[in-house]
Image (cartoon, rainbow, N blue to C red):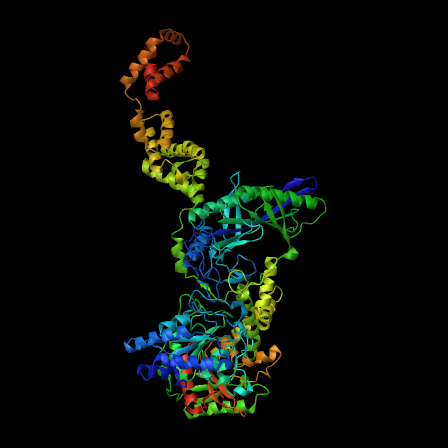
Amino acid sequence: MYKLSLCEIRDGLLKKEFSSVEITKCFLDRIDRYKNINAYITICHEQAIKSAEESDKRISSGDARTMEGIPIGIKDLFVTKGIRTTSGSKMLENFIPPYESTVTQKLIDAGSVFLGKTNMDEFAMGSSNSTSYYGKVLNPWKIQEKLVPGGSSGGSAAAVAGHLCAAATGSDTGGSIRQPAAFTGIVGLKPTYGRCSRFGMIAMASSLDQAGVLTKTVQDSAAFLKVIAGYDEKDSTSVKKEVPDYESFVKKSIKGMKIGIPKEFRVNGMSEDIEKCWRKGANILKEAGAEVIDVSLPYAKYALPVYYIIQPAEASANLARYDGVRYGFRASGKTLDEMYENTREQGFGDEVKRRIMIGTYVLSAGYFDAYYMKALKVQKLIRQNFHDVFEKVDALLTPTTPTSAFSLENEPKDPVTMYLNDIFTVTANIAGVPGMSVPMGLDSEEKPLGLQLIAPHFREDLLIQIGSILELNANFPTLKEIL
Amino acid sequence: MYIETSTGNWEVVIGLEIHAQIISNSKLFSSASTKFGANPNENVSYIDAALPGVLPVINSYCVDQAIKTGLGLNATVNNISFFDRKNYFYADLPQGYQITQFFHPIVSGGYIDLEKEDGTLHRINLERIHIEQDAGKSIHDQSPTKSFIDLNRAGVALMEIVTKPDMRSAEEVTLFLQKLRSILRYLKTCDGNMDEGSMRADVNISLHRPGTPYGTRAEIKNVNSIKFMAIAVNYEIERQINILENGGEVEQETRLFDSVRGITKTMRSKEDAQDYRYFPEPDLPPLILEQSRIDAIKNTIPELPDAKARRLQKEYDLPKYDTTLISEEIEIADFYESALKSINSGSNEVAKLLANWLLGDLFALLNKNNKNITESNISAQNLAELIILIKDNVISGKIAKEVIELMWNEKKSAKEIVEEKGLKQITSPEEIKISLKEVLEEHKDKVLEYKSGKDKLFGFFVGQAMKKTKGKANPKILNDILKELLSE
């Protein structure tokens, strides 16, 4: 039962093949059994059962809402009223929010059941989920090898891949949904910037952060996105645009579509496995009647450096509020400044401190123009590149990551190598366009590989349409059991 | 205007940065109340407290208020402006940054004309006006070991009005602030109460020899009244002259005004100046203002003090002294115009009569009772009624002085007082004649003296007759009849 997709669970519940309480208990049992994966920071046993009972009542009285009774995981940076929300940091170890984020409120209103809050890199800073204060997360694939699940939505990805929930929310600032989705062999969708409300999402880099979904299938991501997307007056950067019925695009013919292969994504030292996977995807699309053409995004290679200026700059300001004064962790100090220093020294992990320092540096007097303003200018050029390329093609196809999941042991020790994990995903964030990772196959070491689709602003429908065709023909061997 | 010393002339150069709290029921980026005097931390939303995940949403009323202010100060309202973050740590700044407009403000330029004593105009140009959020308050004096934070003010909307360095003396600073406050109150965009902190001004002052480049400036903070502002500026001019004339250099620094001792002292030097790391606020889109919105607000701008003074002068031929006093505060101007409308006479004499009674007797009563015009015991309509009684000769000016006192004390209308106390003027010639005849009868000797050339006794007879009529006789009629009787 736990292997069912979100849409299958939805249908099974409506047909009363099983109850929400049954499926919820089933996931809760698995979460407890696979504690070693460490996918969840907080597990909501009682609350989940209670809300599953509610859902069962609604289902039996014919009042089921769009996600009635479906047990999901919530990345721990979505603020949940009354449920501890840590953002993976010691800083918020005891923070119980008094309000609900817009995304989770929409999920509550749609009837979904929250199993718990999933693990993540501290304040979403990381690509392997190893910066979490609450411990590292294991990739459910080849569990003995202790592979990383990717990050920062590593807990959500591991939970979905390991069948510890039907689906999970994530957030993606530079690849935090798509990269872990690729590493764990699931679907990860990052919508257009402004598609989902950021209200109640603990901010990392406000101009790049976007809520999204990690699911077992493309159809699941369509159904899930439909629920969380939409304008929110509490988020002035969300966009007033109608939310289409994404599910209706699943498996729709892509005949006559043009798909671009951006040559800048063919980086030095890319493994033959990745090349093969990329060719496989292109062939599937060709066979489905699409035209696959080579395109160029000349400025794409600057996306990663631009990202590592804008993102730490915004994060350095966004994280200033964790000062020990009003909530969260506080260390003592003889003066106000000493209290700040001790609180932030002890409350933040190394990666967070590193990015705060980078961000503070690039915004300082004398460096601001050379770094931050220059980065904004290059960002404009990258956006223009995308704009131009989407005049020629409907969507782009690229690898999601330059490698498959690495083991905790072989985790890069220097941050810059780690940052390279985002090299293919980050461009979409810099341009604000939607992207999706679809599982495509296994590499020579039997580890999952994903391909990324990138579409123009607000064309998530295209991602779903093309993604479902890729999925249909990839014959990806979905993880059956955690072994 | 130079300051002359034994070593030559100095020119003082002054610019101001005014923080004016925008009148609005809710804060700039949250729906929390802005009401003054609430219990500590009563008016605090999750946004004001900067909980994780919250986002600012611009209060469009505050934007309208800033537009109105810009238009009222002859400035350009920009169709597109942006918000920025100003980063610094302080316990009463929950976000760890202030949302402000650093790079592209909502309003550019503008000016205020000051009128000098000789009647010439001196234009003080404005650099810009931008909108930003206020910080909370740190309270350090309630415990020897603890500080307390009150976030009621955190997030309240401010306009920062920045002038060009166009002022040359404490007097000009005073005039400028009075004028600015007057305009803001007319516009109802800021109440201008410096003592409550809803208007705060920082002053930048430097000195230089005329014809040479500007000197190094010092900034003075924490001046919370216009009176103190003049003291602070003059102290600072004195201090800088002393340094410069003794061969020293003025340091670029921020100084704090000590109102008890009337001096300024170093707060922080240039080396300690903070790097605020301004950068564009990613949580807010550009502030785009349609021209139609700006134009609609333009239509709501009331007649401002200078225009009002000019019009009153022109329409009623009032002296400038009067129109300046009347137009300075909108409440007084409203009071005057409302009373004038009630009288509905259209004559310049009556307009002047009303001005005299408002600026003379009513102002004296307000001062004596320590009240402002909005708290007056006498309404505009009641003052108008009093003026009508004077104008129609129902009571004399002398009686009116009694009447206005009674109106204030008993909170009654002029008519009621006159009626109750029987203060109506005696205008019947017969009645007056009887009283006069009695007086002349009683002072036959004086009548003889008068007739033999002692003219001054005329006044004596008037006084005696007034006494008899308890001051109610119409003086003109009384005079006429007396002349008639004495010439018989």
When the figure is inspected, residue B92 is found, relative to residue B479, above or below; the finding is below
Tell me, yes or no, if residue A402 can be seen here: no
Q: Residue B430 in the image: x percent, y percent?
A: 27, 17
Left or right position of A144 against B399: right
Q: Nearer the viewer, residue A139 or B286?
A: A139
Q: Residue B17 in the image: x percent, y percent?
A: 54, 51
Q: Quadrant of residue A5?
A: bottom left
Q: Residue B250 in the image: x percent, y percent?
A: 67, 49
Left or right position of B346 against B265: left
Residue for point 34% across, 75% down: A53
Left or right position of A279 against B291: right
Tell me, yes or no, if residue A77 can be seen here: yes
Q: Nearer the viewer, residue A483 or B129?
A: A483
When the figure is inspected, residue B174 is found, relative to residue A455, above or below; the finding is above
Q: How many marks?
A: 0
Q: Residue B196 in the image: x percent, y percent?
A: 49, 47
Residue for point 44% across, 82% down: A30
Q: Quadrant of residue A323?
A: bottom right
Residue for point 50% across, 79% down: A38
Q: Nearer the viewer, residue B305 or A221?
A: A221
User: Which quadrant: the N terminus of chain A?
Assistant: bottom left
In the image as oriented, which residue stretches furthest toward the right?
Answer: B247
When the figure is inspected, residue B57 is found, relative to residue B466, above or below; the finding is below
